[in-house]
Amino acid sequence: MTTRVQCPTCGMAVEWSSSSPYRPFCSERCKLIDLGAWASEKHAIPGNELEDDVFSEELSPRH
Ligand SMILES: [Zn+2]
């Protein structure tokens, strides 16, 4: 008998064994998606701080 869980991201059945290194996720992609969703929920930063940073670096060659 095989224990199966559902991938939290896409709902696919995942075998709970060493053949599923990303369990309970079906794949690394689903794992990253879930972690990313969690992170963006927890760190919902308003504004474009990061974007501004990137742009100022790109547009300021004489630093
Ligand atoms: Zn999945």
Image (spheres, grey):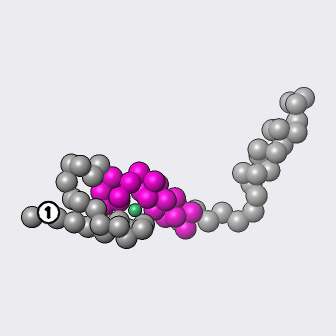
> For the point 80% across and 50% down, which residue is it?
52
Q: Residue at image x 83%, y 38%?
A: 58
Residue depicted at 19% across the width and 54% down the height: 17
Number of callouts:
1
Which quadrant is the N terminus positioned in? bottom left
Looking at the rendered structure, the kind of residue marked 1 is Thr
Image coordinates of residue 53 in percent, x first then y, are: 77, 46
In this picture, is 34 found above or below 62?
below
| Residue 49 on image: x %, y % | 74, 54
User: Quadrant where the C terminus lies?
Assistant: top right
Q: Residue 24 at x, y = what percent?
A: 30, 61
Residue 9 location (% of width, % of height):
42, 66
Mark 1 lies within 8 Å of ligand 1 (Cβ measured): no
Q: Nearer the viewer, residue 37 or 49?
A: 37
The quarter of the rendering in which ligand 1 is drawn is: bottom left
Q: Which residues are magenta?
A: 22-41
Magenta run includes residue 44: no
Q: Which sits in the foreground, 31 or 59?
A: 31
- Viewer-closest of 33 and 47: 33
Sort mark 1 into few (<14), some (14-19) or many (20+) by Cα contacts within 10 Å. few
Type of secondary structure dominating the magenta stretch: helix
Q: Residue furthest left?
A: 1
- Judging by the rendered image, the residue that carries numbered circle 1 is 2
Residue 7 position by quadrant = bottom left
Would residue 34 be found to the left or right of residue 20 on screen? right
The answer to whether residue 35 shows anywhere in this view is no
